[in-house]
């Protein structure tokens, strides 16, 4: 039940990736980037910043075609969507 789409200019995006062989979550928010070790922390901060700025929050999986708009999901769907994307990449 995930809402997919494309982030607009100004939206806040958390991206899943690897750094030095470890899974990381990079939050892209103007004016900078924030690095998190857990998906839960990154998603929580992304949602808070997006709510404050009045923009959408997005999760982008390790493969860029996996994009989920977070602020339209229930709390259970948010954690489930991020977990699904992480597991699909074999990086849970």
Image (cartoon, rainbow, N blue to C red):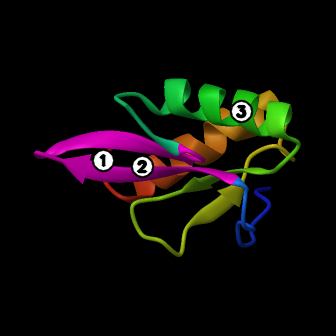
Residue positioned 73% across, 58% down in the render: 10
The quadrant of the rendering that contains the C terminus is top left
Considering only vertical position in the picture, is 11 above or below 36?
below
Q: Which mark is residue 91?
A: 1
Q: How far is the residue under mark 1 from the one under mark 3?
A: 26 Å
Magenta portion: prevailing SS class: strand
| Mark 3 in CB contact with mark 2 (< 8 angstroms) | no
Query: Label 2 neighbourhood size at 10 Å, few (<14), some (14-19), many (20+)?
Result: few
Q: Is residue 78 above or below residue 67?
A: above
Name the front one of labels 3 and 2.
3
Q: Position of residue 77 (x, y in %)?
A: 75, 39
Q: Is residue 24 magenta?
A: yes
At 64% from the left edge and 36% from the top edge, which residue is drawn? 46
Q: Which residues are magenta?
A: 12-31
Please tell me how crowded label 3 is: few (under 14), some (14-19), or many (20+) other residues with Cα within 10 Å.
Answer: some
Residue, disc 3:
49
Residue density around tag 1, few if under 14, some if 14–19, many if 20 or more, within 10 Å: some
The residues bearing labels 1 and 2 have C-alpha atoms spaced at a distance of: 6 Å
Q: Secondary structure at mark 3?
A: helix
Q: Is 19 above or below relative to 44?
A: below
Q: Position of residue 68 (x, y in %)?
A: 68, 58
Say which residue label 2 marks. Answer: 87
């Amino acid at each position: 039940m995930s809402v997919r789409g494309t982030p607009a200019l100004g939206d806040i995006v958390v991206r899943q990736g690897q750094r030095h062989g470890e899974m990381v979550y990079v939050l892209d928010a103007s004016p900078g980037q924030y690095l998190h070790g857990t998906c839960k922390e990154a998603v929580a901060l992304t949602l808070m910043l997006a709510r404050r700025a009045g923009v959408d929050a997005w999760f982008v999986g390790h493969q860029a075609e996996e994009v989920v708009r977070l602020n339209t999901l229930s709390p259970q769907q948010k954690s489930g969507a991020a977990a699904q994307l992480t597991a699909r990449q074999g990086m849970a």
